[in-house]
Image (cartoon, grey):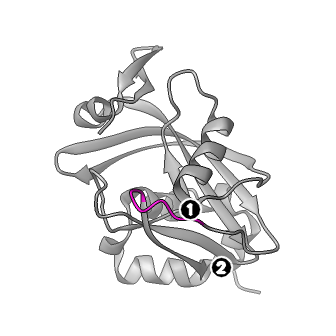
Amino acid sequence: MTHTLIPAWRGETLEPVEKLDAHIRGLKHKAISVFVLRGDEILIQRRAMGKYHTPGLWANTCCTHPNWQESSLDCANRRLNEELGITGLSLEFRDRVEYRADVGGGLIEHEVVDIFVAEVDTTPSLSLNSDEVMATRWIRYGELIQEVVKEPARFTPWLRIYLDTYAPQIFGKLAISCVNPA
C-alpha cells in the first residue's frame, strides 16, 4: 500500500496525514463521494476483495480522499477515472456531510465528505480497475433502499449512512418521491 497523504484536522488546522494512520486513529479527515445517476437508477460498485477495509461490499459509484492540497472536484474526477474509467462527466456539488463509522479491522472513518452527483442520459463507458472494483450495477433508488434494509451487511457503512441520513441532500426529488410516492 502506498503512503498517501490526505488532509486531516488536528484541532482547527488541516495537516497532511497518512491515510491508513487517519483510519487507525479515527482522525477527522476530508473525503469525496460520487453518485452517478441515470433517471431513477444509481451506479453502485462492489469493492475489490483486496481493499484494506470493507472488501466485497457494495458502495456508491466511487469515493476516496483528496490528496494533500488537491481540490475535492479534481479528486472526484480523478477517482471516477481511476476506479471506473469514467471521464467527462459534469459533476454537481450537492453537500458537505460528516459521519463517523467503524469499518472493521479496528479502523474508523471520521469523514467530512464533499458529495458530487452526475446525472447522465446514456450509460457511460466503464473500464473497471480490478484493484479497486470487482463489479458494478445500475439499481433503482427504491430497490437500493429495500436491499439495504433487507441485507445491510452487504453494503458499506457510509452508503447506509448516506441513504438513511443524507438522502434528500444527495438525491433531491428522487429521495422525496420514494418517501412520499405520488
Q: Identify the residue at horizontal 23%, vertical 44% (top origin).
A: 107
Q: Secondary structure at mark 2?
A: helix
Q: Predominant secondary structure in magenta?
A: loop
Q: Residues within 10 Å of mark 2 (few under 14, many from 20)?
A: few
Q: Identify the residue at horizontal 56%, vertical 62% (top origin).
A: 61
In the rendered image, the vertical position of residue 175 relative to residue 24, given as above or below: below
Q: Identify the residue at horizontal 57%, vertical 47% (top origin).
A: 79
**The C terminus - image quarter:** bottom right
Depth check, mark 1 against mark 2: the one in front is 1
Residue under pointer 1: 61
Residue under pointer 2: 178
Q: Choose between 161 and 57: the one closer to the eye.
A: 57
**N-terminal label among 1 and 2:** 1
Q: Choose between 46 and 116: the one closer to the eye.
A: 46
In the rendered image, the vertical position of residue 19 relative to residue 153, given as above or below: above
Q: Secondary structure at mark 1?
A: loop
Span colored in magenta: 127-132
Q: Position of residue 75 (x, y in %)?
A: 60, 38
Q: Tally the numbered discs.
A: 2
**The N terminus - image quarter:** top left
In the rendered image, the vertical position of residue 129 relative to residue 146, given as above or below: above
CB under 8 Å between discs 1 and 2? no
The part of the image, by quadrant, that contains residue 166 is: bottom right
Q: Answer left or right for 175 relative to 105.
A: right
Q: Position of residue 170 (x, y in %)?
A: 65, 57
